């Protein structure tokens, strides 16, 4: 009996022990430990800008404010949920500006700028002008964080070999998801107690982010001098450029990556369309509290991610990114199908089930997001390929959230079906179309024997 009772304790102990630096080769341990510790603090400030959580804060906190009608509020909700992805349009700028420069200090400065943007939201008034100030600050902060994402993958690539990279990225993502879930819960609980508590909470979250920044500054990029020298010696056409045409050149010269990006554009459109109708319908149909709303949009998916990430990490270490997406993407298809059913039956519990499926998808997506391009990119062009990937994401984010709000508003009660149901049906159809592209590419690359690894890892 005692042995049975100890099983949960042993399981938790095993999970905690799996994060130990001693699980990695000795020469990787110091950088891993420092970066992992920094990610115990940095996600707190990101929690204030997480689209699902901030969208709920905007939708409920600014409702009924003078000069703000529901149509305007819907657009603002779409904007703040789109911000993390639209900001990716500036990724090619960060890739170009970081080229030939020391990466860790560059990333650290962007982290500080992000924290300042989060803290500034606390001083915004609850007015029509304040609403758009929140949107603007969210975009600016997210633009800075895009630089962190774009350049961080280059640090990982040089600090961790491919055999360990998915494991390391998975641990970072697991910690980030857990902290983001805690931040979302704190925001929900705080706002339910006092709708103006973000005036204190957001600066506190930003301060925790700065603690993580201080730790991250001690990360050392291995062979940094030779990396910087190699980047500076690269031919002009191989250097990241502030000219967007340079990104087009990557797609022109690499047909497999071009098809992969087409699949990501279509499939990602469906994913980026999910959150706005989710936020709007849960408030409209159930008049949910902050915690109930953020539970569906943020907390549940983030809480599930740490459970899903280790499974996806093991799979990703064995297969090419194209095959990974051809399997992993079905979790999002299942989630949108569940949301459609929940909207048709007005089931809040159904949305929570869909959030579990989203968490499973996000668990794999966070790995593929950070590492997938490396199965296509030469080492010295890592940031350039990543810039193409995140710019692709930004382009679809300019369209998807606003398109889905238009569908939500214009088709509401058409044929007796709610705007939310029409919206989730559109998400489902677009996701399925994207999966068709991934399946085609995976089959083509399998025939070409490009199945298991990237070009030079």
Image (spheres, grey):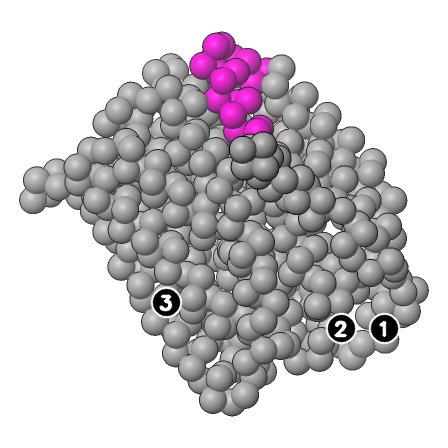
Q: Position of residue 83 (x, y in %)?
A: 51, 42
**Residue on which disc 1 sits:** 230
Determine the residue positioned at 31% across, 66% down: 433
**Magenta span:** 182-199
Q: Is the C-beta separation of discs 2 and 3 under 8 Å?
A: no
Q: Position of residue 428 (x, y in %)?
A: 28, 55
- Does the image show residue 145? no
N-terminal-most mark, 2 or 3: 2
In terms of secondary structure, what is the magenta stretch mainly? helix
Choose mark 1 or mark 3, whichever is in front. Answer: 3
* Residue at the far front in the pictured view: 1
Q: Residues within 10 Å of mark 1 (few under 14, many from 20)?
A: some
Q: Residue furthest bottom?
A: 448
Pick the front one: 308 or 333: 308
Q: Which residue is mark 2?
A: 380
Examine the image and state in which quarter residue 441 appears: bottom left
Q: Quadrant of the C terminus?
A: bottom right
Is mark 1 in CB contact (under 8 Å) with mark 2?
A: yes
Q: Nearer the viewer, residue 210 or 73?
A: 210
**Left or right: where 200 falls relative to 34:** left
Q: Residues within 10 Å of mark 3 (few under 14, many from 20)?
A: many
Q: CA distance from mark 1 to mark 2?
A: 8 Å
- State the residue position of label 3: 435
């Amino acid at each position: 009996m005692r042995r049975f009772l100890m099983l949960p304790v042993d399981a938790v102990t095993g999970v905690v022990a799996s994060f130990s630096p001693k699980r990695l080769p000795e020469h990787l341990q110091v950088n891993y430990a420092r970066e992992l510790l920094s990610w115990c603090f940095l996600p707190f400030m990101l929690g204030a800008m997480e689209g699902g959580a901030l969208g709920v804060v905007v939708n409920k906190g600014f409702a009924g404010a003078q000069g703000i009608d529901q149509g305007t509020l819907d657009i603002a909700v779409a904007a703040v949920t789109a911000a993390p992805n639209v900001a990716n349009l500036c990724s090619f700028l960060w890739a170009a500006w970081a080229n030939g420069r020391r990466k860790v200090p560059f990333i650290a400065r962007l982290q500080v700028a992000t924290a300042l943007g989060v803290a500034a939201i606390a001083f915004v008034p609850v007015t029509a002008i304040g609403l758009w100030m929140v949107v603007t600050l969210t975009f600016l902060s997210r633009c800075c964080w895009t630089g962190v994402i774009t350049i961080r993958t280059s640090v990982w690539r040089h600090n961790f070999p491919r055999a360990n990279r998915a494991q390391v990225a998975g641990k970072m993502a697991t910690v980030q998801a857990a902290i983001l879930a805690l931040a979302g819960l704190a925001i929900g609980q705080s706002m339910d107690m006092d709708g103006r508590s973000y005036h204190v909470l957001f600066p506190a979250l930003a301060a925790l982010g700065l603690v993580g920044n201080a730790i991250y500054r001690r990360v050392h990029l291995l062979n940094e001098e030779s990396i910087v020298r190699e980047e500076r010696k690269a031919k002009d056409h191989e250097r990241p450029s502030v000219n967007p045409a340079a990104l087009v050149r990557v797609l022109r010269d690499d047909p497999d990556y071009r098809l992969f990006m087409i699949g990501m554009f279509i499939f990602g459109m469906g994913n980026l369309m999910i959150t706005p109708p989710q936020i709007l319908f849960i408030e409209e149909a159930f008049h949910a509290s902050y915690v109930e709303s953020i539970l569906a949009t943020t907390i549940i998916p983030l809480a599930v991610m740490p459970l899903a990430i280790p499974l996806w990490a093991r799979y990703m270490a064995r297969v090419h990114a194209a095959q990974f997406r051809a399997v992993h993407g079905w979790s999002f298809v299942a989630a949108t199908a569940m949301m459609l059913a929940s909207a048709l039956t007005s089931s809040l519990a159904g949305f929570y089930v869909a959030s579990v499926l989203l968490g499973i998808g996000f668990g794999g997506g966070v790995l593929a997001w950070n590492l997938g391009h490396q199965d296509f990119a030469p080492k010295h062009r890592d940031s350039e390929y990543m810039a193409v990937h995140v710019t692709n994401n930004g382009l679809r984010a300019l369209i998807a959230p606003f398109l889905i709000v238009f569908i939500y508003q214009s088709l509401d009660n058409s044929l007796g079906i709610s705007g939310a149901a029409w919206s989730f049906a559109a998400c489902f159809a677009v996701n399925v179309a994207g999966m068709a592209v991934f399946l085609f590419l995976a089959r083509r690359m399998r025939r070409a024997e490009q199945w298991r690894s990237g070009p030079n890892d």
